């Protein structure tokens, strides 16, 4: 495993730990942000049942996102053949294209590991990546939603915004 891969693994582990530790706060913030976004965008016909369904979707997405950072579940990312297949499948399923954001994350990780003494600084470097870039793929999700807000994109957007507020 390369130093870059080690740093990316540490990045995902730190994200996982932060989100697990703040899961109750994530749940609370999801409801607050969802309420605010529905009001600001003026989505029509949003009754109590529809709100409950979107909230439930957001909460399911929170669990899904936490698990994507799980150090035991993320390991497929570092096997290039499997990674490419998984990434292409994800691109087919997601409404956003996060390839550029992932390249930025890898580029930033590479630049940080070139300083040497990785083992001693791994946690610090992972924290720096999170402060500089946030949680992958939140930037892509947030910008794609803001450019064209739709109900279909709303749960991903709410979760991305919530995660970004929690991790910093």
Image (spheres, rainbow, N blue to C red):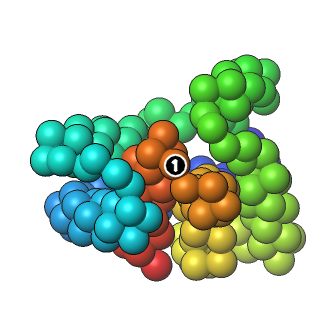
Horizontal side of 155 relative to 12 (left or right) equals: left
Taking the spot 63% from the left edge, 38% from the top edge, the residue there is 95
Quadrant, the N terminus: top right
When the figure is inspected, residue 75 is found, relative to residue 129, above or below; the finding is above
Mark 1 neighbour density, 10 Å: few (under 14) some (14–19) many (20 or more): few
Dividing the picture into quadrants, the one containing residue 151 is top left
Residue 147 coordinates in the image, percent (x, y)? 67, 61
Taking the spot 78% from the left edge, 72% from the top edge, the residue there is 112
Q: Which residue is mark 1?
A: 150
Horizontal side of 7 relative to 157 (left or right) equals: right
112 vs 95, nearest the viewer = 95
When the figure is inspected, residue 31 is found, relative to residue 125, above or below; the finding is above
29 vs 124, nearest the viewer = 29
Element carrying mark 1: loop
Horizontal side of 65 relative to 122 (left or right) equals: left
52 vs 90, nearest the viewer = 52
> How many numbered discs sit on the rendered protein?
1
Q: Is residue 120 at all visible to an observer of this figure?
A: no
What residue occupies the far front of the structure in this picture? 44
When the figure is inspected, residue 89 is found, relative to residue 147, above or below; the finding is above
Taking the spot 13% from the left edge, 47% from the top edge, the residue there is 48
Residue 56 coordinates in the image, percent (x, y)? 23, 41
Horizontal side of 101 relative to 72 (left or right) equals: right
Taking the spot 68% from the left edge, 25% from the top edge, the residue there is 92
Residue 134 coordinates in the image, percent (x, y)? 58, 68
Q: Is residue 36 at all visible to an observer of this figure?
A: yes
Residue 54 coordinates in the image, percent (x, y)? 29, 43
């Amino acid at each position: 495993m390369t130093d870059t891969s080690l740093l990316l693994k540490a990045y995902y582990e730190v994200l996982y730990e932060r989100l697990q530790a703040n899961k109750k706060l994530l749940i609370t913030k999801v409801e607050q942000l969802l309420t605010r976004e529905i009001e600001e965008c003026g989505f029509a016909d949003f009754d109590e049942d529809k709100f409950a369904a979107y909230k439930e979707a957001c909460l399911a997405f929170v669990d899904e996102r936490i698990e994507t950072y799980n150090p035991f579940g993320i390991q497929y990312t570092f096997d290039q053949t499997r990674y490419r297949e998984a990434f292409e499948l994800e691109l087919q399923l997601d409404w956003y294209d996060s390839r550029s954001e992932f390249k930025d994350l890898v580029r930033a990780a590479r630049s940080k590991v070139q300083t040497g003494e990785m083992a001693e600084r791994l946690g610090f470097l992972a924290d720096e990546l999170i402060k500089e870039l946030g949680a992958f793929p939140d930037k892509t999700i947030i910008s794609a939603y803001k450019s064209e807000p739709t109900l279909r994109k709303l749960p991903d957007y709410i979760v991305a915004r919530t995660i970004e507020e929690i991790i910093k």
